[in-house]
Image: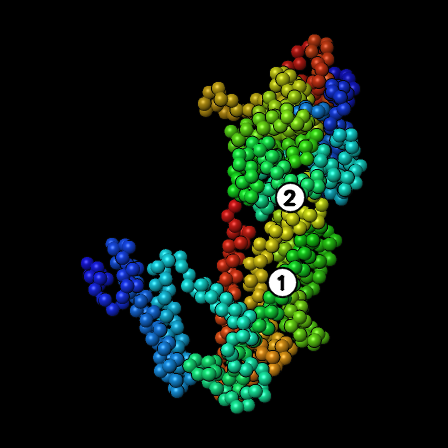
Amino acid sequence: MSSSSAALQERSGAARETPVLVVDDLRTQIHTPHGDVQAVDGISFTLGRGETLGVVGESGSGKSVLGRTIMGLYTTGPTMTVTGRVLIAGKDVHALSASELRELWGGDVGMVFQDPMTALNPVKKVGVHLTESLRKRRGMNRPQAKARAAELLALVGIPEPRRRLDQYPHELSGGMRQRVVIAMALANEPALLIADEPTTALDVTVQRQILDLLARLQDELGMAIMLISHNLGVVAGRADRVAVMYAGRVVETADAAALFDAPHHPYTEALLEAIPRLHQPPHVRLAAIDGAPPNMVAPPVGCRFAPRCRYAQPDCTEAPPSLDPAMANGVVTPGHSFACYHPVNAGGQ
Amino acid sequence: MSEMTQVSTPPAYGQAVDAAVAPAPMQDPRRSRSLWAGVVLTALGIVTVAIGVAGLRGANGWLQLAVVVAGLALTHVGAGRLLRHRFGAGFDLTSWLSAIWLVLLVLAALLAPVLPLGEHEDIASTLSAPVFARPDLLSEYPLGTNNFGLDLLARVLYGARASLVVALGAVAMGLVIGAALGIVSGFFRKTTDAVIGIFTNSLLAVPPLILLIALATVLEPSLRNLAFALSLLALPSIVRMARASTLTFVQREFVLAARAMGASRLRIMTRELLPNVMLPLLSYAMVMISVLIVAEASLSFLGLGIQPPDPSWGNMIAEGEGNAFEEHPHIVLVPGVVLFLTVFSLNLLGEKARKRFDPRQAKL
């Protein structure tokens, strides 16, 4: 366990051609009346074309702030300070002017929001939601934009798209609305789609349809997806790589299969154990992680998970562990890193 | 059993009753009794009104008024029962009457120049007309005449033109400016919000009537200036409402979604926020119109609004000063009742609209 801290970034960056998204030592500090909160604390990764990164963590771990900081929706201002670099399709998001940023949002990057009930304007027709940006960005006229909007609705699997264009959001079901939100994000064929808990507000069968839809669209359009979720089950099988976040930091990242197979960080292990399973005998107490995420105004010194960790040792509270590559039998496992002094499932160490 | 026979026997009331009862012969006895009460009350009311208008033509005016009012009240109760029987228990006769009153008033005000009305402002042409004629619906002057022999019906309708134009104009101005200021201050917060807040709070701090009197002394008393002065009265509350609902809507995800799609701030304010903010404002505007009609009447009453030979409800009421009201009460009662009915109708309907569109009571 003695290797460079930027190992993660180097390895995954080398994997494919020009990456769609490069995040380098990103830090977002939110100023609150109670003190400064380090919501995102030194995160680095890259994402190539057609790749999916799953970002997992419990509420308050900084996932959504990470997503919005990458979008450039959160920038340095009176309420927060952002440092580090984000490159989307080669453009430094936090160095762009306001109008260049709007250009980027309409084009290179799209975002899908958590709650389709509030992500659509209740007094605007579905068609208007879609055609507005098409007419503005692409200079389409009204019938062209309408035709394209109908195409987009068909693309996201909405039946009778022509008729839906003239309906209001409240006339659609939750799943349909989320499809509309996805269609909006796809309107200008973005290279990167940030999906911030896209299925949390939906019931399970619809969740699956939406995730299948995202996977199909990724195949067809070749975009990179950053899939943010608090649910490991949502990310499993959908993401190529998974990053587990805790208290603003990535505590473990690996190829999805490797992570689910042999998690090294106790937090990942605990999250996996907390997934309820159908084959469990009935009336068994569900596994949970004791305690709550730390107060981020004054996070614990050392490993931030230590106070809740069942394997914690005295050295865990002295200095924060760095994100180092995993070793198996003395050989570095490619793509797998974790930040822990006392990892689980670490056979050869 | 007795009710059944009762329903089928009297032939005097004709087919209308039969048609109402026929589709459901096994009626709840209480319902058909209420129907009968409705028919009787309505008939009694209409007869009483007729007696009041025609039968007591020469009698004491107060007695005549009392009889007509009693007749109208009876008709209202009876007709309410009949219509509830016909259209179900949810039928609200008073709201319908309010709407009908407003529609008639607006139509009559619009068409006043082409209606066969008496003279409303030219004193020279009414030299031979009776002065202080009592209201008599069957005479040439249905609502009577004033001290110059001018026809009160005509004056009330021309006065409605002034009142409605001023109130509607003021509310329209208030809505446009108030919604814009409210959305801007709710959207940008910080300094913008503080500046607009100081402006609205200082408007609120001045007593409204004193503000109006001050403005009326400075400005020429024209319809446009009156509307402007009254819009200042409506402005602070509209700004506050617009700001408050902007604050709630700006946190919704669709605003963030619009930003994430590259919408500019102006676009977010006009396309995302304005339609949402406007809905509660419009229902509030209805109540505001009635407040401003009263405010305009107060100004004209004080002689600061519309200037006398031009009629307005306020300056018509002011004509009752001195002994005129004691000797000829209709001079004050006619414009007063019209003002009352208009304000009452607007409030009733505005309250209904508010209940329907209030975001706090909206069923999501």
Quadrant in the picture for residue B252: top right
Q: Looking at this view, is B254 or A231 the one in front? A: B254
Label 2, residues with CA under 10 Å away: few <14, some 14-19, many ≥20: few
Say what secondary structure mark 2 lies in.
helix
The chain under label 1 reads B
Which residue occupies the extreme top position in the image? Answer: A329
Q: Judge depth for marks 2 and 1 and give the one in front.
A: 2
Quadrant in the picture for residue A179: top right
In percent of the image, x 52 and y 61: which residue is there?
B350
Badge 1 is on which residue? Answer: B172
x, y percent for residue B38: 32, 66
Q: Is residue A187 left or right of residue B346?
A: right
| Amino acid type at mark 1 | Ala
Give the Cα separation between the discs numbered 2 and 1.
Answer: 31 Å
x, y percent for residue A197: 61, 32
In percent of the image, x 56 and y 43: which residue is there?
A166
The chain under label 2 reads A
x, y percent for residue B46: 35, 73
In percent of the image, x 54 and y 43: which residue is there?
A167
Badge 2 is on which residue? Answer: A142
x, y percent for residue B126: 55, 87
| Amino acid type at mark 2 | Arg
- From this view, report whether residue B239 is shown above or below residue A257: below
Which quadrant does the N terminus of chain A fall into?
A: top right
Q: Looking at this view, is B12 or A330 the one in front? A: B12
In percent of the image, x 70 and y 30: which residue is there?
A191
Mark 2 vs 1: CB contact within 8 A:
no
Say what secondary structure mark 1 lies in.
helix
User: Does residue A34 appear in this view?
Assistant: no
Discs 2, 1: same chain: no
Q: Is residue B2 left or right of residue A127?
A: left
